[in-house]
Image (cartoon, rainbow, N blue to C red):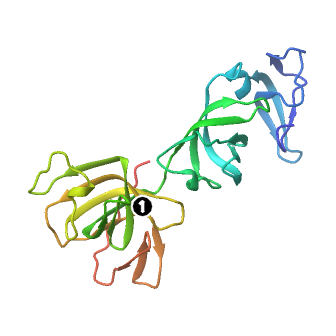
Amino acid sequence: MINALIVNYSAANLTGFAGGQPANGDLVEVQGTSFDSGTTTLTATRVDKQMSDQEEAGNHEDMEREGLITRFASATDFDVAGEPVTTTSATVYRNGTEADLALNVKVEVEGSFNSSNVLVADVVSFHHNGGVELQSTVTAVDTTAGTLTVLGVEITVTSSTRLEDRSSAQVEMFSLSNISVGDTVDVRGFESPAGSGKLVATRLDRQPASTEVEVSGTFTAGTSPQFMVFGITVDASAATLRVRAARL
């Protein structure tokens, strides 16, 4: 069996099995052309033994694992793609923080196995879906905290944020300290921590002064003709509606 699937391999070609037959716990790839939905049975024509993550990693060598967090108990006890992962005080987080670890978050983990065959993360990189873009005037700046506020959203600028000055000032070594209340900015980023309504900027451009407001993100239904994007209420009563095709 593979999960709930029954595999009949009595007539299949078997390769890679030390004992000549599959054993409990083996990682396998099965190929077949006949499936009985009534008995949930696949009749295999070929069964190949695959290397597990531990076998690929060898003697505790570095390895990577990418996928959704499928079980989350704590930052030191969770599964990625069904396999156990832990972190330490030395773990480095990219595009997020420890607080962003949660169920169904997509991550890439780099590390090595401990004696219990648990992947100990040296680096955890977050892969964020549903990016957010805001364009409007700055209403607050806190250079000590490394934040600014646009459309009521607190935005954090990090060392990874790409900053560029497209205003008439054209500051070459542009940073958060060059931004003032009333400046027009275009910010792109992702929510962090998850569910906080706060944004971590991946890119921040200061624009020429403008009264135009732009909000891009995941649509949340409200009382028509109003809806919300990243917690910002949008009144579409006087809007022209256009459909933009999605690229797959």
Left or right of 245 on screen, residue 196 = right
User: Which amino acid type is shown beneath numbered disc 1?
Assistant: Leu
Quarter of the image that includes the N terminus: top right
Quarter assignment of residue 154? bottom left
Count of labels in the image = 1
| Residue 179, image x, y percentages | 22, 60
Q: Residue furthest front?
A: 144
Left or right of 243 on screen, residue 108 = right
Left or right of 121 on screen, residue 79 = right
Residue toward you, 244 or 103: 103
> Image point 34% across, 56% down: which residue?
188
Residue toward you, 226 or 192: 192
Quarter assignment of residue 195? bottom right
| Residue 231, image x, y percentages | 44, 73
Sort mark 1 into few (<14), some (14-19) or many (20+) by Cα contacts within 10 Å.
many
Quick one: SS at disc 1?
A: strand
> Image point 47% across, 68% down: which residue?
197
Quarter assignment of residue 236? bottom left
| Residue 175, image x, y percentages | 25, 51
Q: Which residue is mark 1?
A: 199
In the displayed structure, 222 sits above or below 83; it is: below
> Image point 65% across, 49% down: which residue?
69
> Image point 36% across, 74% down: which residue?
152
| Residue 172, image x, y percentages | 15, 45
In the displayed structure, 143 sits above or below 121; it is: below
Residue toward you, 70 or 57: 57
